[in-house]
Image (cartoon, rainbow, N blue to C red):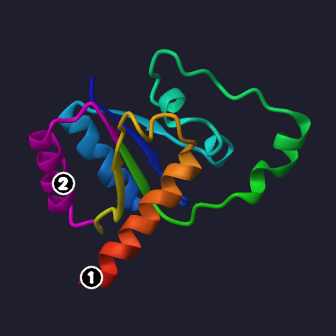
Amino acid sequence: MEKVLYYKPEKNEDTVKLTGVFIRMGIRMKNIEPEQFDETVGYLAGIKGFEAKKKSHADVSTENDVIIPEEVLVLQDFTRQRIDMLLREIKKTGRPKVDLKAVITPKNVSWTFYELYEEIKREHEAMSKKD
């Protein structure tokens, strides 16, 4: 079943528009919170075999040091056609596009949400320089 892991630092009208698109398309959505940045993508997506990270006292005291200032969409179990449809529907709302998007793959499923964010941010910056 299609699922989106969604993070936005500050919820606003654009968040509501995006949520509406997910609902209309029958896509499950999981909001990601900053305290989940160190969890694996597989765990956050509910993929069998991935467990929650056991947090030590040190983890709890430092987890707020990590910041993601941008909106992030991570797609699970989407076909190419459904990704295209999702992007068209988002565009129709008139809200700004989500620059940082990824699809869950065998390679990134074991990364933390923050590690995936760093990678897609690097890729986006590299692609933006080509334009």
Residue at 28% across, 65% down: 97
Tell me the mark number nearer the camera, choosing from 2 and 1.
1
Please say whether residue 79 is one of the residues in the magenta stretch: yes
Q: How many marks?
A: 2
Q: Is residue 10 left or right of residue 89?
A: right
Q: Secondary structure at mark 2?
A: helix
Q: Nearer the viewer, residue 102 or 86?
A: 102
Q: Residues within 10 Å of mark 2 (few under 14, many from 20)?
A: some
Q: Quadrant of residue 25?
A: top left
Position in image of residue 131 (x %, y %) = 23, 84
- According to the picture, the residue beneath numbered tag 1 turns out to be 130
Q: Is residue 45 above or below residue 111?
A: above
Distance between mark 2 and mark 1 Cα atoms = 22 Å
Q: Is residue 4 left or right of residue 59?
A: left
Residue at 18% across, 62% down: 91
Which residue extends farthest front?
107
Q: Amino acid at mark 2?
A: Leu
Callout 2 touching callout 1 (CB < 8 Å): no
Q: Secondary structure at mark 1?
A: helix
Q: Earlier in the sequence, mark 2 or mark 1?
A: 2
Position in image of residue 84 (x %, y %) = 12, 50
Residue at 18% across, 45% down: 83
Specify start and end residues of the magenta stretch as a single range.
75-95
- According to the picture, the residue beneath numbered tag 2 turns out to be 87
Position in image of residue 17 (x %, y %) = 30, 53
Q: Residues within 10 Å of mark 1 (few under 14, many from 20)?
A: few
Residue at 27% across, 40% down: 22
Please say whether residue 82 is one of the residues in the magenta stretch: yes
